[in-house]
Image (cartoon, grey):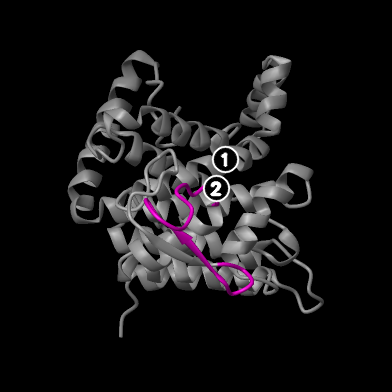
Amino acid sequence: MEENKKQLIKRLCESWINSAYQTDGSIGIGVNTEKFRLLTNNIVFHELTYEETQAACVGLTHVLLLKGMNTIIDRDHLVFWSWMGELFSSRETGYFGTEEFQIQKLFEVVIRASLAGIQPPVRNQEEWEVQNQIRELTEFNTLQLVTNSSLVQAYLVFPLLEAVIKKACREYIDYSGKVITDFTVSKKDGTIQNYGCSGQGKRFCSSLRDLLFLLYYNVADVDLKEQITLVRQHIFELDNQEDPFDLIYRWRNSSLHGETSYPTIGGTLLNLVILIALAEIKQNYELIKSKTWSRVQWELQSFNYTKHRSPWSFYPPFWS
């Protein structure tokens, strides 16, 4: 049976991982791994279907979660994130309502932090010298902020994830954390935590862990739950000492003390945000994708004349 694109994406990501792990347990990046990159194999993100986009998101998450928290952020991740930034920030998508302006801005800043400092591949010595000159001319504090952009991404992705989960779970909880519909969550010790809008139980939920469980067991449909399960499995491969949602909760605390890899945290949770958000636009994905890409094409044509890029533009990540 001929391999479809969804299967191809999954195979390429798994092949990259299998090639990266060496027999001595170390990570080796080179010709044997880079031939499996998605962009190298003509995977064009703005052409993917909904299911193919999900597969890319999950596959690129798996590539991020290397043992020892050694994360390799590749151009595949950056170009994918730039397309997701374009898609969800556009008027055509309508994912963020007018009352969710602050959440949309938070999403956009997380994407900007993810892309900060991206440069097109260097093709010759002259292009390398130009890029180096640009770095030298960049204002010092701006340059340092770009250098530490993975830290910015990791810190801001937590409140973004909370907001996106609350949006998905709006029948149970509002953005302030106030419980609207009763629900229960199993605690780490096996006991039950009750949440209720009246009577017994907590009336507010401020725990990212409990929000994740609420989404997973009470709100996510079969498709979204399957995608989150795949991410959970990949996280479990990284650390099998606790439930992946408990690990994410611990990431939030330990990240404050520099005990974990910021790119691993930021990239993994951003992809989780994307999976949750994608589920909300599933029914209209093809139409949204088409309209968004048409607008990008118009902006690219306009750029050829004006050399001015819209401040709301995310994709492609670099223009020339």
In the rendered image, is residue 227 in sight? yes
Asked if 11 appears above or below 246 in the picture, the reply is below
Residue 195 shown in magenta: yes
Give how far apart the Cα atoms at labels 2 and 1 are: 9 Å
Q: Give yes or no for contact between labels 2 and 1 (Cβ–Cβ under 8 Å).
A: yes
Residue type for callout 2: Arg
Residue under label 1, please give it: 121
Q: Quadrant of residue 117?
A: top right
Secondary structure mostly seen in magenta is loop
Crowdedness near tag 1: few (<14), some (14–19) or many (≥20) residues, C-alpha within 10 Å: few
Crowdedness near tag 2: few (<14), some (14–19) or many (≥20) residues, C-alpha within 10 Å: some
Q: Which mark is residue 75?
A: 2
Asked if 216 appears above or below 104 in the picture, the reply is below
Q: Which residues are magenta?
A: 187-207
Residue type for callout 1: Pro
Q: What residue lies at 67% left-to-right and 68% top-to-bottom?
A: 238
Q: Quadrant of the N terminus?
A: bottom left
Sooner in the amino-acid sequence: mark 2 or mark 1 = 2
Question: Closest to the observer: 250 or 12?
Answer: 250
In the image, taking residue 281 as reference, residue 185 lies left or right, namely: right
In the rendered image, is residue 122 in sight? no
